[in-house]
Image (cartoon, rainbow, N blue to C red):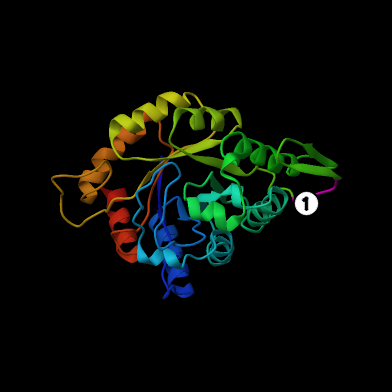
Amino acid sequence: MDLGMGLPVTGGDVDPEHIARVAQTAEQAGLGAVWTFERLLRPAQARMLGMDQPVPLPDSYGSVLDPLETLAYVAARTSTIRLGTSVVDALFHNPVVLAKRLATLDRLSGGRAMIGLGQGWMEQEFEAAGVPVKRRGAGFAEHVQAMQACWGPDPVSFSGRFYSIPEADIGPKPSPSGLTLLAGVGAPAAIERAAALGMGIVVVVFDWDQARQAVEAYGKGPGPLVFQVNGPVTDRPLTDRAPMTGSPEQVAGDLVQARELGADHVLWHPMETGADELVERLAEVLTS
């Protein structure tokens, strides 16, 4: 099991050199991956599908760098650290175009891409992308299958309910080692769907019971198991804390349990901790 962290890709003052420095420092500190995510927009009142109450979002979500362009930039400034997304909302993209972009990133980075794909949860993003909400579920599975067809031998062809690809040569293909695909999941049905598609999973961990249930639903799945933590790593111990948050010593202790549950990777997003500080804290975790 190794550790990773989100890059500082949000807000109007995003600095490319800062992003590169954070990624290089993370690589030098021995972290396994750096991560980005996708956010199309920050609505005045964000609504989660199926809910009437608005969902609060950070002000910085009004400006989020494109995840794949950011990782291509980081690939050129690093050598070995893996490059992850948690997540790109696949349904907002044409599968042929997204397949080419992902394969390009994987080839240019030397096979370092670790791509988490999601179905989307924000009502206004579906509206802005012009995608019907009914594409979630079966439409997501078909989108992934269409991309997998693009990455297979030429000539490629695909015919489904939502997507169709005429017989054609489509490239580039991912690196020979293959592109690591993950699904951002929560519900058991989504976990089972990811396993059927040959994908690993990314689980945002809120408590140990929820994490354990996700692991049990995935079983001996075909891909990596990634735990995502949105809480802070602090310089002092916390008394009331979520799993894998608190001081480096507390986090290191929790990682034993994460490893026993079968996690292959744990990532933190720098939501409450600055990116530079988070690198320092995770370096301390590695030596705890």
Residue at point 72%, 50% (across, down): 96
Q: Report the residue marked by disc 1.
A: 171
- Local crowd size for mark 1, using a 10 Å CA cut-off: few (<14), some (14–19), many (≥20): some
Please name the amino acid that badge 1 sits on.
Gly
Work out whether residue 151 or residue 135 is closer to the camera in this orientation and state it.
135
Residue 173 point in image, percent of width and height: 73, 48
Residue at point 56%, 39% (across, down): 136
Residue at point 35%, 33% (across, down): 211
Residue 199 seen in the figure? yes
Magenta segment range? Answer: 168-172
All told, the count of numbered labels is 1
Q: Is residue 18 above or below residue 250?
A: below
Q: Is residue 277 above or below residue 195?
A: below
Residue 222 seen in the figure? no
Work out whether residue 228 or residue 45 is closer to the camera in this orientation and state it.
45
Answer whether residue 94 is magenta in the image. no
Instruction: Name which quarter of the figure residue 56 lies in.
Output: bottom left
Q: Residue furthest front?
A: 52
Q: Residue furthest left?
A: 239
Work out whether residue 242 or residue 44 is closer to the camera in this orientation and state it.
44
Secondary element at tag 1: loop
Q: Quadrant of the N terminus?
A: top left
Residue 232 point in image, percent of width and height: 27, 53
Residue 118 point in image, percent of width and height: 52, 45
Residue 172 point in image, percent of width and height: 75, 52
